[in-house]
Image (cartoon, rainbow, N blue to C red):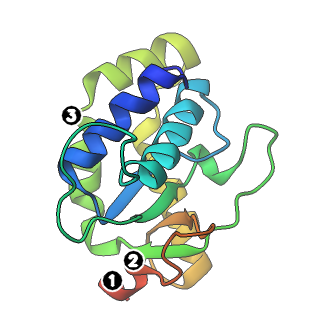
C-alpha cells in the first residue's frame, strides 16, 4: 500500500460510492507499514470524499464526514512498545466463539504469521488480548478503539450509542 495521489483518489471514489457513516481502519501507528498507509488513506478519504470536485460521482443525500475509529494495534502497543490508550471499548464477551471461528478461517494470515513471525498462536493471542482489554472495563472480553475526533469529525461516540 502506498499513500499517494492515485491511491487517495481511488479510496475517495470508493467512499463516495458508499457514503459511509462509520469507518474502521488500522491503527495510526502499527507494526506493519501497510497498515499505517491504509489508516492514512481511510482518514484522507473519509475527510475529502464529500468535497465538491475532489473526485467524480454524485454525492448521496446526507453525505458528510463519517465517524472514524482506529482499531487496536496488535497487543495494544505501538511500534515503539508504548501502550495505546483507547477512547472506546466494546464488550465482545458473547461473541468470542464467533470471533475465534472467523479468525481461524483466515488461512493465509495463519500461514504468513507462521512463516514470517514464527508464530502459530494467533488464536490464543487474540483471546488473551481480548481478555486483557476486557479486564480494563470489567468484562470477559472487549475490543478497543481510538476515535478520530479532529476538526469536522463527529464528536459523539457512535460505538457507545450502538453498543453501550
**Where does residue 102 sit, x and y in percent of width and height?**
22, 45
Quadrant for the C terminus, please.
bottom left
Q: Which residue is mark 3?
A: 105
**Where does residue 91 sit, x and y in percent of width and height?**
40, 76
Q: Which mark is residue 31?
A: none
Quarter of the rendering containing residue 3:
top right
Residue at 80%, 44% in the rendered image: 81
- At label 1, counting other C-alpha atoms closer than 10 Å, the crowd grade (few under 14, some 14-19, many 20 or more) is few
**Where does residue 128 sit, x and y in percent of width and height?**
52, 55
Q: Is residue 79 left or right of residue 16?
A: right
- At label 2, counting other C-alpha atoms closer than 10 Å, the crowd grade (few under 14, some 14-19, many 20 or more) is some
The count of marks equals 3
Of pointers 3 and 1, the one earlier in the residue sequence: 3
Residue at 51%, 48% in the rendered image: 43
Quarter of the rendering containing residue 132:
bottom right
- In front of the other: label 2 or label 3? 2
Of pointers 2 and 3, the one earlier in the residue sequence: 3
Residue at the farthest top position: 115
Q: Is residue 86 visible?
A: yes
Q: Is residue 125 left or right of residue 16?
A: right
Callouts 2 and 1 close, C-beta under 8 Å: yes
Callouts 3 and 1 close, C-beta under 8 Å: no
Q: Secondary structure at mark 1?
A: helix
- In front of the other: label 3 or label 1? 1
- For the residue pair 103 and 61, the one nearer the viewer reads as 61
Q: Is residue 124 above or below residue 36?
A: below
Q: Secondary structure at mark 2?
A: helix
Q: Which residue is mark 1?
A: 163
Residue at 50%, 74% in the rendered image: 89
Q: Is residue 47 above or below residue 12?
A: below
Q: Secondary structure at mark 3?
A: loop
Q: Which residue is mark 2?
A: 159
Amino acid at each position: 500500500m502506498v499513500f499517494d495521489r492515485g491511491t487517495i483518489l481511488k479510496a475517495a471514489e470508493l467512499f463516495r460510492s458508499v457514503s459511509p457513516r462509520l469507518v474502521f481502519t488500522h491503527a495510526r501507528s502499527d507494526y506493519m507499514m501497510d497498515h499505517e498507509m491504509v489508516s492514512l488513506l481511510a482518514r484522507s478519504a473519509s475527510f475529502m470524499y464529500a468535497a465538491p470536485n475532489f473526485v467524480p460521482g454524485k454525492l448521496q443525500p446526507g453525505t458528510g464526514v463519517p465517524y472514524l475509529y482506529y482499531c487496536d494495534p496488535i497487543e495494544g502497543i505501538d511500534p515503539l512498545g508504548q501502550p495505546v490508550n483507547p477512547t472506546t471499548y466494546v464488550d465482545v464477551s458473547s461473541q468470542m466463539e464467533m470471533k475465534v471461528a472467523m479468525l481461524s478461517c483466515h488461512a493465509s494470515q495463519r500461514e504468513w504469521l507462521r512463516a514470517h513471525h514464527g508464530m502459530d498462536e494467533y488464536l490464543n493471542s487474540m483471546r488473551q488480548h481480548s481478555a486483557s482489554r476486557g479486564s480494563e472495563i470489567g468484562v470477559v472480553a472487549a475490543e478497543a478503539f481510538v476515535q478520530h475526533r479532529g476538526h469536522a469529525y463527529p464528536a459523539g461516540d457512535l460505538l457507545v450509542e450502538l453498543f453501550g
